Amino acid sequence: MKRLYILSCIILLMAACQKDWLDREPRTIISDEQVWNDPKQIVALLANFYDRIPAENGLTDVNDDGDGRLFQWRNMANYDEGMWSGQSNEDWRNNITSYGYDSWYLWNYTYIRDINLALENIEKYGLNLSTAQKTQYTAELRFLRAFNYFNLVKRMGGVPLVTTRLVYDYSGNVTNLQLPRAKEAEVYDFIGTELDAVKDQLGNDGSATRANKYTALALKSRAMLYAGSLAKYNSLMAAPISTPGGEVGIPASLANGYYQKALDAAREVISSGAYTLYRSNPNPGENFYEAVSKKASNKEVILVKDFLLPTRKHVFSYDNIARGIREDNLGSSSVVPSLNLVESFEYLDGSNGALKTRTADNTDFIYYNTPADIFANKDARLYGTIIYPGASFKGLSVSIQAGVMVWNGTRYDVVEGSDLGTTYTDGKLLTGTSGPHRSIQEVSNTGFYLRKYIDPNDKTSTRGIQSDMWWIWFRLGEVYLNAAEAAFELGLTGDALTYINTLRERAGFGASSLSTLTIDRIRNERRVELAFEDHRLWDLKRWRLADKVWNGNPSGPDAMIYALYPYRVVRPGDAARDGKYVFVKMTAPRIRAPRFFQLGNYYSAINQKVLNNNPKIIKNPFH
Amino acid sequence: MTRTILSSFAILFFLLAGCKKDNYEKPASTLTGKVVYNKEPIGLRSRGVQLELWQHGFQLFTKIPVSVSQDGSFSAMLFDGNYKLVLLPGNGPWVNNTDSIDVTVRGSTTVDVTVQPYFIIRSAPVTKNGTEITATVSIEKISAAQSLESISLYAGKTNIVDQVNNQGSVTVNAADIPDQSQPVTIKMNIPAGLVTQNYFFARVGVKTAGVAESIYSLPVKIE
């Protein structure tokens, strides 16, 4: 009996063994063969790569220096478009005594390696893919790589052009992995040729979330425009910024070539008819807001980072909606537009956009019947971008009033509420539910609120529901501006006027509102059309204007952030003035330091770790 | 019982003896000095110019930044050792010099950093006439490598007055200066924020093209 028992045990043990027991396919790891032969998994991987495209601004809160993942909406408050009015623990954004030399640093070669690896693997393992599929995915990966090199070169200047996976061979010698920086012009040329090579292979026609031919052309027009203006305006500096090896600094002789490429690419997008400027709403202000923010039948956007309720969402609306109409009990008002930006929107007759608060001889205020009257006849893009006093959002009026001005017989006493939504002794409004207020956090400090990128749908500014507003990488409006600027720089002023006037007509100006053009006008168009879309910093950098505009001067008109405070006049017995509204321009109270951009900020300082690891990398100028 | 208590005291004693408040001594030696030309210190923007100290021979190789104050002086608390002092190219208002200066720190050490500015301010008296202040600036070109960009007059409440700390400023571009060898007169209306002050400070800055920082005169107290 006992022997039988032992025998059966042995048989059982033997039967439990399998020949390849130790060589099983893992159930939790996907092999390269599985990934690169399955279009669904490749698309999933592509989604990861699209998600990791870095942006200095964005709609979420991603800020990983190590991996170069960057999509940080709070940075909108760091320049001259706006300031920080949210929680006071981020007040440092109002007190940037000078931009650090490591600002806007990006060195995300992990991303480039991942793409290079994907490109090699799809060749090696993707044997069951059709040629068409393989070509398309390869083209898409190369588009993303070109886009990333553009994001690198606009921050760092020339960077090492790595197009294959770098593998260490355990020889003890790493010099073959230490690549020197390419010339700045070479990186732009690489972007141009890569995009030319892949643009007809991308497919994805009509997609706004994956790259197609016109996405590649839109990127090309932007990149070539940057290269052209860098070549031109760097050389016009009294002392051009350059390195002996050309890692920084593009020769002026190349400018026209780049401008021509930018114009050709932009023209191809515009003339294709694949995209049209959004004109569905007869109200030009609402129309401009919808051009950026409305997803349904929007033929203007070319590439977006999309979000989708109920799972793919963000709290940008929670953090930035106007205080008085917030739907949550916290949040709101974090990034608020500056008066500087508001005044850059022209009047519809083409005159300078400075708001008129004082009479011509500066003896008295100008009295307005309603707070919104001071903004009458402004470029409709002001309404589409910014909530100003007297404007409404989601059908709710936003109550913006700083206080009252009480006439004491000889002059006005300024009375401001210590809280929001307060009533003055005459039973009427003192301080509005949306401020502005000088010191309370999460109330506008400038008198303005964001409209662009704020979700118009119900309850989207609550943390429970959140928003699925998309982020725009490229839209046709920018392509028009690229075309206009490139054409103007090439001397084709007539073409440039056509492009600019088309955009202005959409913004409520009359047909052919401009008959002459200057580069300053084109620059201002870019500022107002593309506000808060991550363009201002890069535009000022490539025009070599950043150190002039953000010159650190606390008494200058551009470097400080200004506010506009509306007051109701209490002056009984003076029917022409009592109950009217006056406006005071002032430095925004929470701003502690002017914007200060130095020559060493034009190219970010390369991290010392990178320099230590690779002695062939040279430093940028001024560092 | 007594033994338990005693032994627990002994253990506590050993544990306490094992602790030290900090693992490392803090740096105790001071390095001080001035940025000079012809033995005269150079006037700068407060916290504007940075010198770099580098120390070889350790695994962590990264710079120790040293800010120069507005009278051209600087100081740093360091460990004793051998350092290399480096001028950032294009940062200060002087000709680039890529030579590093060997600095040996033993206790208190003083090092003067000699530079060659592009321009120096020979004299810049500022006077007040009614609601206006006037600066008469005489500059001298020391290096021909870079040209003049502008001359600015700054006024502020404290004696820290410069490009980013002021209540008002007036800038004259080089194109509007016919003869740079002659004194340049800059007039400024007293800024609104200073009209009611008993006294304020004014200072002149000279900006060289292609250089981040200006060279400044000494602040002048105006009563």
Image (spheres, rainbow, N blue to C red):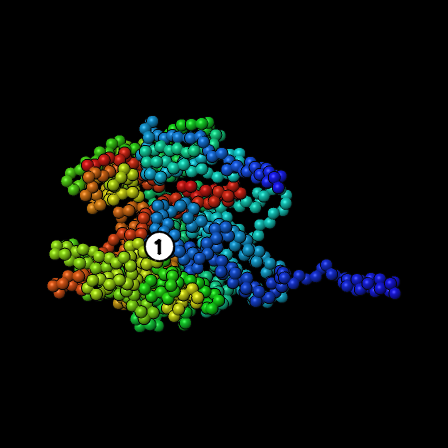
Which residue occupies the foreground of this view, A350 or A44?
A: A44
Relative image position of residue A448 (x, y in whole percent)? 30, 60
Q: Which residue is mark 1?
A: A84
Which residue occupies the foreground of this view, B158 or A339?
A: B158
Query: In the displayed structure, would residue A100 be above or below residue A419?
Result: above
Query: In the displayed structure, would residue A200 be above or below residue A563?
Result: below
Relative image position of residue A555 (x, y in whole percent)? 26, 47
- At 20% from the left and 46% from the top, the residue drawn is B192
Q: Along the horizontal axis of the image, is B56 left or right of A229?
A: right
Query: Quarter holding the N terminus of chain A?
Result: bottom right
On the question of residue B134 being in view, the answer is: no
Q: Give the tally of numbered discs.
A: 1
Q: Along the horizontal axis of the image, is A401 left or right of B21?
A: left
Residue extending furthest front? B1
Density class for disc 1 (Cα within 10 Å; few <14, some 14-19, many ≥20) is many
On the question of residue B155 being in view, the answer is: yes
Query: In the displayed structure, would residue A136 be above or below residue B22?
Result: below
Query: In the displayed structure, would residue A208 be above or below residue A552?
Result: below
Which residue occupies the foreground of this view, A250 or A536?
A: A536
Relative image position of residue A362 (x, y in whole percent)? 16, 54
Amino acid type at circle 1 is Trp
Which residue occupies the foreground of this view, A5 or A205?
A: A5
- At 40% from the left and 61% from the top, the residue drawn is A316
- At 63% from the left and 45% from the top, the residue drawn is A170
Query: Quarter holding the C terminus of chain A?
Result: top left
Relative image position of residue A67 (x, y in whole percent)? 50, 52
Specify the subunit that label 1 lies on: A
Mark 1, secondary structure of its residue: strand
Q: Indicate the quadrant where residue A425 lies.
A: bottom left
- At 29% from the left and 65% from the top, the residue drawn is A398
